[in-house]
Amino acid sequence: MDNRVYLKILKCFGAKGTRFTTEDLARELGTSKRTVYAYFSSKDEMIEKTIDFVFSQIIQSDTAILENTGLPIQDKIRLYFQNIPDAYSIGTIIRHMDDLQRYYPRLYERVNHHLDTIWDGVIALVEEGINRDELQKVDTVILKLMLNETLRKLLDYEFIAGHQVSFESGIKAMSDIVLYGLIKTDHPKSTG
């Protein structure tokens, strides 16, 4: 499947939520509804595959960092936090979670599953670093909660607008707090 199709679905979804039509998508793609149905059997499938596309992009880039055997754990963790996902794509989905919950509850659960597991790779890395005595001992359940809730807030348009912070600057600030804490030390701040 051409990535362009998923980006067009995201555009339609962003504009109308779950109320976008196959005709809207066909117009965006400059093709017919029949051609759209050659790719997808239903709107449900369109949305599901687009959700999977968005999160698979994040997973692929995170996996490349986590599986890099040439990097020490601390460098992997720094790079993982600097690997900021595409706020537009995830934000488009998050903005319409109420519609998903109401009309597509299975897809709503799928998005929540992706969001709840997005930090699993780095949490496993932190646990490995703790076990090797390379990192401070921290409660990884609480760390994951902090990361999940911060991500969800930073994807909330009203929160972002009300606090005049961008998704990217919020993720960087969260990363700096997690990586370097509040107490002044000799650690350099991240440059990403």
Image (cartoon, grey):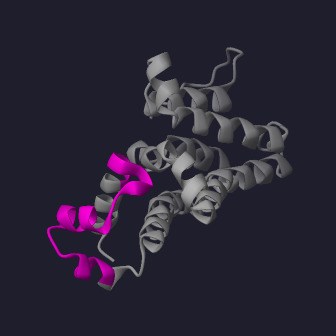
Please say whether residue 31 is one of the residues in the magenta stretch: yes
Question: Magenta region, mostly helix, strand or loop?
Answer: helix
Q: Position of residue 143 (x, y in %)?
A: 76, 38
Q: Residue furthest top?
A: 184
Q: Position of residue 16 (x, y in %)?
A: 36, 49
Q: Taking 54 as reference, is 71 left or right? A: right
Please give the name of the residue rendered at 18% of the width and 64% of the height, measured from the top-left corner.
Answer: 27
Relative to 81, is 22 above or below? below
Please give the name of the residue rendered at 47% of the width and 49% of the height, measured from the top-left corner.
Answer: 90
Instruction: Work out whether residue 104 or residue 29 is closer to the camera in this orientation and state it.
Output: 104
Q: Which image quarter: residue 191?
A: top left
Instruction: Work out whether residue 20 or residue 84 is closer to the camera in this orientation and state it.
Output: 20
Instruction: Work out whether residue 6 or residue 70 is closer to the camera in this orientation and state it.
Output: 6
Relative to 179, is 122 above or below? below
Q: Position of residue 49 (x, y in %)?
A: 46, 70
Q: Taking 112 as reference, is 11 left or right? A: left
Please give the name of the residue rendered at 51% of the width and 46% of the height, measured from the top-left corner.
Answer: 94
Please give the name of the residue rendered at 31% of the width and 68% of the height, measured from the top-left corner.
Answer: 22
Relative to 133, is 24 above or below? below
Instruction: Work out whether residue 116 or residue 122 is closer to the camera in this orientation and state it.
Output: 116
Q: Is residue 168 visible?
A: yes
Start and end of the magenta stretch?
13-37
Q: Which image quarter: residue 6?
A: bottom left
Relative to 82, is 67 above or below? below
The total number of labels drawn is 0
- Quadrant containing the N terminus is bottom left
